[in-house]
Image (tube, helix red, strand yellow):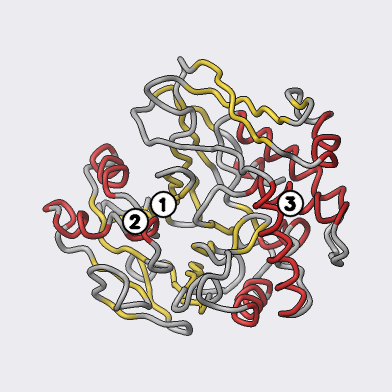
Amino acid sequence: STSTSTSTSTSTPTTTLLRSMTTYSQQKFASSFPYCYGGMFIQQIERNAAATKVYCHQMQYSSYSVTTLPILDDNYVYLLNDSASKEKGVVCVDCGSFEPVNRWCKRNNDSFVDKVLVTHHHFDHVDGIASLVDCERHHNVQILGADNARIPNQTHAITGGDMFELFDGQVVVDVLCADGHTKNHVAYHIHSPHTHEGGCLFTGDSMFSGGCGRLFEGNATDAFKTLSSFKSLHPSTLVFPGHEYTLTNLLFALDLLEHADIATSVTETSLLQALEQCKNNLEKGIPTVPTTIAHELQINVFLNATSPAHLRQLLDAKLAFNNRSNKPILKFSPKPISNPHTTPVTSLNA
């Protein structure tokens, strides 16, 4: 597999602040992050007035490529295209904003969005759909989702357990029930028609790297069932979540080990290694995702929950952590790009 990330070459450093960190987190980060002092953690990210350093990240997998497109504050849109074909149709996973997706299509083979695979109805995952449907370039777009009442312009109803093909049968999509964060939430496992091993899992807000979606409509039993289904996938499965939340989730897990009386099989060593990789990626303008099921089993305390009650404890602890600690500010904006460079995909979550 190969991957390409793209950045600007003229950016100047600015600082992003994460205030109110716990003393424990400050101590743990002092050696890894040189800007940690007092009650404040400063993360340097290259930026300039016109564009952020992170624009997009593209990797080749099997017969198709996956482009990670940052939108809004910390969301990711994923664009899949058949690299072996001259077809210009692109598959979009969650269209939370129209302009970045349309701009990418114009610049990449003058392509168009053929299908949108929607994970759930929240605005930051669907707000670009109406404009996509109205745009002449994408006028035949199909909108697949499991929540017809709340997903705008849905054309095809799907549900957990469904299966369909993409790119003339070169890949198969298994629709997984992923309730918890919301009702009628689904995830998409895209893999070879010849095997269920590996492939790519698009989780929306049901699971993040190191984290789990907050329960707005579902309950801990729903979320535990969802995470259990993810655990059953092959360890090499690549995981593409809907947000860049890795740093916050790893901070929480370290804090949990120190302060909370809640058991977890995740170790401090694994977390510190993951945090170092997270730091390196963000400083280079590389998203911290995709991750893998194997990696998440090492660092994700929610994925390692042993019961719905245990998961509920972890979620409550995470909410309390969020209430006393500001999240890292990682705002991405899809602006014009230049100076491409290549980074091995294995470096994303080694």
> Could you give the CA–CA distance between mark 2 and mark 1, rounded to whole angstroms?
6 Å
**Which residue is identified by label 1?**
77
Q: Nearer the viewer, mark 3 or mark 1?
A: 3
Is label 3 in contact with label 1 (beta carbons under 8 Å)? Answer: no
Residue 206: quadrant of the picture: bottom right
Q: Are marks 2 and 1 in contact (CB under 8 Å)?
A: yes
Choose mark 3 or mark 2, whichever is in front: 3
Provide the residue designation for mark 2: 95
- Residue at (72% x, 72% y) in the render: 311
Q: Position of residue 306 (x, y in %)?
A: 79, 76
* Cα gap from disc 3 to disc 2, whole angstroms: 29 Å
Q: Indicate the amino acid at tag 2.
A: Cys
Does any portion of residue 202 appear in the rendered image? no
Q: Amino acid at mark 3?
A: Phe
Residue 292 position by quadrant: bottom right
Q: Residue at x 44, y 78 (%)?
A: 184
Answer with left or right where residue 213 lies relative to residue 28.
left
Q: Camera-side residue: 309 or 287?
A: 309
* In the depicted structure, whether residue 278 falls above or below residue 89: above
Going by the numbered disc 1, the residue's amino acid type is Val
> Regarding mark 2 in the picture, which secondary structure is present there?
loop
- Residue lying farthest left? 136
| Residue 125 in picture, x, y percent from top left | 39, 59
Disc 3 designates what residue? 252
For the residue pair 173 and 259, the one nearer the viewer reads as: 259
Answer above or below: position of 26 versus 117: above
